[in-house]
Amino acid sequence: MTIDTLAEKNVDELDLIYRNGILPSSFKALDGMPKGRMLSIKYIDKTPLSFFIKYFAGSGLFPWEGKSFKSNNNIEGSGINRIQIMNTLKFNWFPFKTKIVPSIIDGRDCILLDYDLPENPWFIRKIRDELRKVSNHLFLGPAMWKNNKGGADLVLWFAISG
């Protein structure tokens, strides 16, 4: 499985792959600067617009480049999103902490990317990202919007590979 084969999947197929994913043996598996890719957006997934969004997400013009991770130990770490604009301007924005928690998707353990940090703007603090390993050096995750009921609603699927 590769990031390109994941990009061909729809929201329901990605959900099934995620549910079958596992935790890495160590957070060190994420260390570095893996490449990221937005895969599929809920509600747009089965529309004609989906093709164009997926094409844009796989192009060099898409602003999200990936995430950088640094493990503190085997069960927690930190990271930041890498953003590029027009392949020239590069930024490290929106830091997060990583830890193991039950997934909103199925209750099984996952890696939470916790953006609820004082340095992030309020709308970034409302994001809940999760990750599971689905193949060697390939992680899949839902990006969700925290709701007022203590849960979160799926917005899109993304992958990181490195």
Image: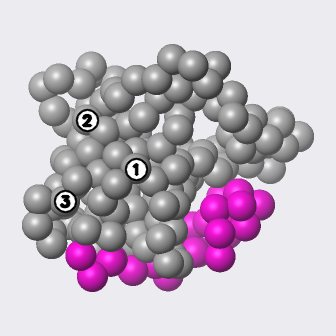
Residue in view at x 53 percent, y 34 percent: 64
Dot 3 amino acid type: Ser
Could you say whether the residue bearing mark 1 is in a helix, strand or loop?
loop
Which amino acid does the dot numbered 1 rest on? Met
Q: Is residue 136 magenta?
A: no
**Residue 7 in view in this figure:** yes
Q: Residues within 10 Å of mark 1 (few under 14, many from 20)?
A: some
For the point 13% across and 25% down, the residue is 118
Looking at the image, is mark 2 or mark 3 nearer the viewer? Answer: 3
Question: Front-most of 60 and 113?
Answer: 60
Q: Secondary structure at mark 2?
A: strand
Position of 67 compared to 2: left or right?
left
Q: Dot 3, crowdedness within 10 Å: few (<14), some or many (≥20)?
A: many
Q: Which residues are magenta?
A: 1-26
Residue carrying label 1: 33
Which residue corresponds to mark 2? Answer: 95
- The residue sitting at 35% across, 46% down in the picture is 68
Q: 45 or 30, which is in the foreground?
A: 30
Dot 2 or dot 3, earlier in sequence? 3
Considering every residue shown, the one lying at the far right of the view is: 48
* Cα gap from disc 2 to disc 1, whole angstroms: 14 Å
Residue for point 51% across, 17% down: 89
